[in-house]
Amino acid sequence: MDSIIFPELPTYVGEPTLAGLLSLAVTVLLPIVAALFMKSSWSAFRKGLVLLVLAALKAYAEAWLGAVNNDEAFNFTAAAYSTVVQFVLAVVAYVGLLRNTAPQRAALVGGPVKDRHGDYVR
């Protein structure tokens, strides 16, 4: 699907494929992965930065793999746009589905980054 408004998004909007659906599933689970790398006592801003970095890593890895597989030049603009889309989808998934769930609490407590004052979840 060629679109001027939406470059190749990780969700392949309008043209669902197995790769696109897998990418969307990983994006929805991105807040759980991000929780492994943050402290529960951090501010929402710091937690958002961790999520943004992971969304960027995922988006740029997907864009790089796509460029290599299709023998094309790497498109930084589309990858940056994809980062924003994936970050927004991850935030929506967190607010709508994952906040204060058992997997989210377990990721915060079980991750390699620990709070000094004990593990607690806000």
Image: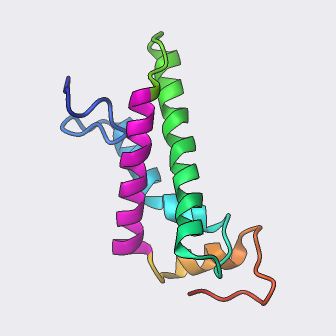
In the displayed structure, 25 sits above or below 12; it is below
| Way the structure is coloured | rainbow
Residue 4, image quadrant: top left
Task: Identify the residue at image location x=58%, y=76%.
Answer: 43
In the displayed structure, 30 sits above or below 106; it is above
The location of residue 47, given as percent across then percent down, is 57, 68
Task: Identify the residue at image location x=57%, y=42%.
Answer: 57
User: Quarter holding the C terminus?
Assistant: bottom right
Instruction: Count all numbered tags in the image, as a single digit.
Output: 0
Residue 83, image quadrant: top left
Task: Identify the residue at image location x=68%, y=75%.
Answer: 39
The magenta stretch spans residue 90: yes
Q: Main secondary structure of the magenta part?
A: helix
Residue 111, image quadrant: bottom right
Drawn side of residue 57 relative to residue 111, left or right: left
The location of residue 17, given as percent across then percent down, is 30, 36
The location of residue 99, given as percent across then percent down, is 45, 78
For this orientation, the residue located farthest to the top is 71
In the depicted view, which residue is nearer to us: 6 or 1?
A: 6
For this orientation, the residue located farthest to the right is 116
Magenta span of residues: 77-98
In the displayed structure, 74 sits above or below 12; it is above
The magenta stretch spans residue 31: no
Task: Identify the residue at image location x=29%, y=29%.
Answer: 7
User: Quarter holding the N terminus?
Assistant: top left
Drawn side of residue 81 relative to residue 1, left or right: right
The location of residue 53, given as percent across then percent down, is 58, 50
